Every structure is written in structure tokens, then in C-alpha cells.
């Protein structure tokens, strides 16, 4: 109990530092370190018991009586909905998991929770990594997986009409692979690929992207419209089906990346792209990580058309080789994984050969191998997408601290190289890899909370801190695609300044005066 009270007091101190125009320097770092160490070492039982008692049985009965709503209070379901894919956990479980099956059901649940001042944490697929789905103040977890319809235009005879406008509307609970499977006979695909089979609503809420962002952009560039339920239970429509609009405030962009703190996204209209006719992939081996990153900037400067451009350091290659049985072992050196596409094989080959010339002649690439074999290419990318789990497997049983820095492309080589050096100097495990084409990379830091020494955890945290500061110093961001959640709140004032964070707080208070929507995420109110 003392630990819990102490952590809350420290969070209050952090909030004061962020919002009282104090300079958020070393004090924030010390507070964050203390919170971090306490959160991963404290027992959960007392906090769970206290929060379970806050939601009454009469309230749960009222929830269960709402049409098209299922309510589950079984412990395994509560535990499953209390954490995402990383080390962020909460000592507090939700009191119930609520499964709405319609927009109207979401509205009714939100109104009921608003009247009772019960917090709501939206839940998509549980693949987020910054504590987004942790119920830090108890309340309910709202699982949107049963909002899962894909609204394809239908012909009179029951077939699917051509998608002439290059978009489709889906419910928020639709998963990425589910959508692309439904589109497989249309010649179109939804191209944002974060690796995980995330829900579309969750991808919008977190402003997700992934390996294909270098060509197709992030979720922000791939949505046209959405519907959301605000904290008062009203439904709002943001955006239109038109490709552009200058009408009013850009509420679509406000909701994209709001992480469930401003409302519950229930429906999204996403852009689609034609499937490319010809695709080739390349694997490039370099002597140094710095040269690999420099080659990326040079290819972008030369106008090489890249669909994907991934960078992996030596530690990532080690994890890759140990985890991926379907792919031949790669040399223990930094690599680039590239993908190219076009309307003809000739146009693809032109881009491949231009990239090869830059990598080999200018940056000492030792081995540049490419293939147009579809099975080989898919095996390579499947293995790449499992690299997060491969990193955790380097320390069996570990949880991952996931960094997500994104820097200007000209700064990528120095930033990722310095981070990889930090990992070696600190003597911790931390593969570095990412989406080099847009300056975004991750350092995965596996930890074993029950057995790692305080000294080891301090060194891990220092690698994380240095990376965040380094990204901010060069005009970058601490999160390129994962979002803020609860894990990166302490960096926002450093990245944007206290006044900008206060503007976010003002928006949050205006739309959610009772602070029921995913509290203690993005900003502290």
C-alpha cells in the first residue's frame, strides 16, 4: 500500500513539473526511473482488490441489461485485457470486460459509465506496447472485437462491386489480415502493415504505421473518415469520402493518435491501393551500421522507389538467425532488407540495380542479393515481422521495453549507431532495427523483472533515456508509430514544450471533463 501511494505521489509530482512551467530536466528522469522500478517489482494483489470493489454489482447488472452488450468478469479475461505486448502492466485489473456489438451499444455503455464516473479503456487486439490498454484507474475494458463488419459495396446479385473510389469502410474491430483477406479478389489491398495483426480501430487510435510507410504512409495518410463515440455518448463523424477537404477543423487528425482518450472509434473509412504487378526483394550486407543507414539516405536522395526499407544491426541478425527456422542464417553483420514494386519487371529491375549501385559502390555493401520469387520474399518478411519476439527470445521469459525513436533521415546513421554502441557499452541485450526509409527504429530491451538486478535495470533504463533524449536533440520524436500511452508521458514536455502539452490537456478536459476515457494516457489530467 505504501508503494502504491508513493507511486501516485510521484506521478502527481511529475504532473506538476510538466504543467507548472518548470523546466523538466533531471528531476523527471529520476521520477520516471523510480516509477519504472517500482511498477515492475511491486505486488498486484492489493491494487486489484481495491479497484474491484469500486464498481458495484448494480452497475454491472445495468451494463449487462444493455442490448447487444456482453459482460465478462472472469479473472482470466480481466487479466488478458489488462496489458498489451510489452513490459507495461498495471497492478489494477478492470472490473469487467464489455463487448458491444453495435454503435448504439457503445453509446449506451459510454453514457452509463459517464453517469457513474467509471473509466473506460478501449481495447482492440491488445498489440500495443506503451501501456495503452492498462486500466490504471480500474473501471471497464471495452473490447471492440465484435464490431467486425467490413462494409463492401454489394451488387444486386450479391457479388462485390468494384472499389472504384479506392476506399472501404470497416468497423473498428476488424483486424488487418481479416480486411486484406476480404479484399483478395478485388485487386486492392490495405497497405499499412505494422507487423502485428492489429485492429483497424486500434491502428487509428495509436497512429500506427510499419514497414510499408516509406511508400504508402502511416495511418494518418490512409484514412478518409471515421465515426467515434464521445465521452458524453454522442456520435461524431470526422472526415468524408472525398480525397481532400478544407472544411473546418481537422478533427480526423485529432482523433487519429488520440489513443482512446477523447472517445471510442467505432468505424473507419480506409484508403486502398492496387496490388503491385511485379515485386522484388533484396538483402544487403554492410560492414558497419553507420554505412547501412547512410546508404538508405543516399537511396532516398537518388529517388529510388522503395516499398520497404528495413535496417537491422548485428544483435538483430543474431536474434533473427536463432528464431527464424524457415530462413537461411544471415552473416553476423548489419543488414538492409529492401522491397521494390512496379507495373513491369523492367521498371522494378531498374530500381533494384540503382539501389545496388549505391549500396555497393558508395557504401561498401559486401553482398547484395535480390529475388522476385514470391515464396522467398514472403518468408523473409514473415521472419522480419517476428523480430520483436525473436528479440525477447534472446532472454527467455522476458518482457520487452520497446523504444520507437524517429529522426530526420540525415540523422538516422548517427542516432542508430550511437544507440547500438550504448547497448554494447552498458552490457545489456538490445537489438536495434526499424523502418530506415522514414527514420524510425526500435531498440528492444528485454527484461526479467523477477530476476534482473537493480543495476541491470538501471542500465537498461539509461539506454532508453539516452535514446529518447538523442532523438529530441536532433528534432525527432520519441515515438514514431507506437504512441504515447502511459509509457512516454514524461517525454512529451521535453519534445514539445510545456505550453504544447497544456494545449493537449485543454482539449482533453473540453471533450472529457470527467476524465473517464482511458485516463493517465497521453496526458495527465
Image (tube, rainbow, N blue to C red):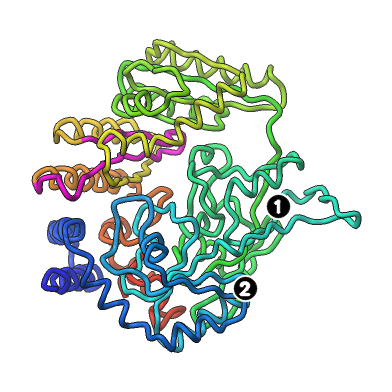
Q: Please tell me the numbered disc located at residue 519.
A: none
Tell me if residue 448 is in the magenta stretch: yes
Residue shown at the point (59%, 64%) measured from the top left:
146
Residue 110 on the magenta span: no
Q: Nearer the viewer, residue 32 or 45?
A: 45
Q: Nearer the viewer, residue 290 or 129?
A: 129
Disc 2 element? helix
Q: Which residue is mark 2?
A: 103
- Residue 304 location, quadrant: top right
Badge 2 crowding class, 10 Å Cα cut-off, few under 14, some 14 to 19, many 20 or more, is some
Assign the C terminus to one quadrant of the image: bottom left
Q: Badge 1, how many Cα within 10 Å: few under 14, some, many 20+?
A: many
Numbered range of the magenta stretch: 429-454
Where residue 466 appears, x then y in whole percent?
A: 21, 44
249 vs 92, left or right, is: right
Q: Is residue 356 above or below residue 520?
A: above
Q: Is residue 25 visible?
A: no
Q: CA distance from mark 2 to mark 1?
A: 21 Å
Position of residue 252 measured from the top left corner of the image (x, y, whole percent):
57, 64
Residues tagged 2 and 1 counted as in contact (Cβ below 8 A): no
Q: Is residue 167 left or right of residue 427?
A: right
Amino acid at each position: 500500500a505504501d508503494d502504491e501511494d508513493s507511486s501516485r505521489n510521484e506521478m502527481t509530482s511529475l504532473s506538476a513539473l510538466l504543467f507548472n512551467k518548470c523546466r523538466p530536466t533531471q528531476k523527471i528522469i529520476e521520477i520516471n526511473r523510480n516509477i519504472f522500478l517500482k511498477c515492475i517489482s511491486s505486488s498486484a494483489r492489493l491494487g486489484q482488490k481495491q479497484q474491484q470493489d469500486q464498481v458495484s454489482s448494480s452497475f454491472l447488472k445495468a451494463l449487462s441489461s444493455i442490448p447487444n452488450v456482453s459482460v465478462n468478469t472472469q479473472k482470466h479475461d480481466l487479466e488478458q485485457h489488462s496489458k498489451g505486448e510489452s513490459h507495461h502492466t498495471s497492478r489494477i485489473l478492470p472490473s469487467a470486460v464489455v463487448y458491444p456489438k453495435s454503435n448504439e451499444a457503445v453509446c449506451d455503455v459510454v453514457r452509463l459509465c459517464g453517469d457513474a464516473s467509471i473509466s473506460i479503456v478501449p481495447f482492440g487486439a491488445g498489440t500495443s506496447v506503451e501501456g495503452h490498454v492498462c486500466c490504471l484507474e480500474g473501471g471497464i475494458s471495452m473490447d471492440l472485437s465484435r464490431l467486425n463488419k467490413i462494409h463492401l459495396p454489394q451488387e444486386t446479385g450479391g457479388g462485390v462491386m468494384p472499389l472504384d473510389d479506392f476506399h472501404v469502410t470497416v468497423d473498428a474491430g476488424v483486424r488487418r489480415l481479416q480486411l486484406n483477406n476480404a479484399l483478395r479478389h478485388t485487386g486492392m489491398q490495405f497497405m499499412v502493415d505494422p507487423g502485428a495483426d492489429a485492429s483497424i480501430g486500434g491502428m487509428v487510435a495509436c497512429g500506427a504505421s510499419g514497414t510499408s510507410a516509406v511508400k504508402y504512409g502511416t495511418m494518418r495518410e490512409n484514412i478518409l473518415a471515421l465515426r467515434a463515440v464521445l465521452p458524453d455518448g454522442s456520435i461524431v463523424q470526422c472526415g468524408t469520402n472525398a480525397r481532400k477537404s478544407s472544411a473546418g477543423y481537422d478533427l480526423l487528425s485529432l482523433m487519429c493518435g488520440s489513443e482512446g482518450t477523447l472517445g471510442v472509434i467505432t468505424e473507419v473509412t480506409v484508403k486502398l491501393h492496387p496490388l503491385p504487378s511485379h515485386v522484388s526483394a533484396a538483402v544487403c550486407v554492410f560492414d558497419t551500421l553507420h554505412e547501412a543507414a547512410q546508404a538508405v539516405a543516399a537511396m532516398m536522395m537518388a529517388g529510388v522507389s522503395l516499398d520497404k526499407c528495413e535496417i537491422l544491426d548485428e544483435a538483430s541478425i543474431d536474434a533473427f538467425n536463432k528464431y527464424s527456422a524457415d530462413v537461411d542464417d544471415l552473416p553476423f553483420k548489419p543488414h538492409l532488407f529492401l522491397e521494390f514494386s512496379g507495373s513491369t519487371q523492367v521498371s522494378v529491375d531498374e530500381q533494384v540495380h540503382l539501389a545496388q549501385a549505391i549500396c555497393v559502390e558508395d557504401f561498401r555493401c559486401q553482398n547484395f542479393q535480390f529475388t522476385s520469387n514470391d515464396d522467398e520474399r514472403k518468408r523473409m518478411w514473415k521472419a522480419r515481422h517476428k523480430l520483436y519476439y525473436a528479440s525477447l527470445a534472446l532472454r527467455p521469459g522476458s518482457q520487452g521495453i520497446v523504444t520507437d525513436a524517429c529522426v530526420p533521415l540525415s540523422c538516422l546513421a548517427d542516432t542508430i549507431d550511437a544507440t547500438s554502441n550504448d547497448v554494447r557499452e552498458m552490457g545489456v541485450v538490445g537489438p536495434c532495427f526499424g523502418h530506415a526509409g522514414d527514420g524510425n527504429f526500435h531498440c528492444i530491451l528485454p527484461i526479467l523483472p523477477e530476476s534482473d538486478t537493480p543495476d541491470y535495470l538501471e542500465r537498461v533504463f539509461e539506454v532508453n533515456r539516452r535514446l529518447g533524449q538523442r532523438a529530441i536533440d536532433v528534432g525527432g520524436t520519441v515515438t514514431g508509430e507506437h504512441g504515447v500511452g502511459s509509457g512516454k508521458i514524461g517525454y512529451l514536455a521535453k519534445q514539445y514544450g510545456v505550453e504544447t502539452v497544456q494545449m493537449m490537456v485543454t482539449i482533453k478536459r473540453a471533450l472529457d471533463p470527467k476524465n473517464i476515457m482511458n485516463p493517465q494516457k497521453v496526458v495527465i489530467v
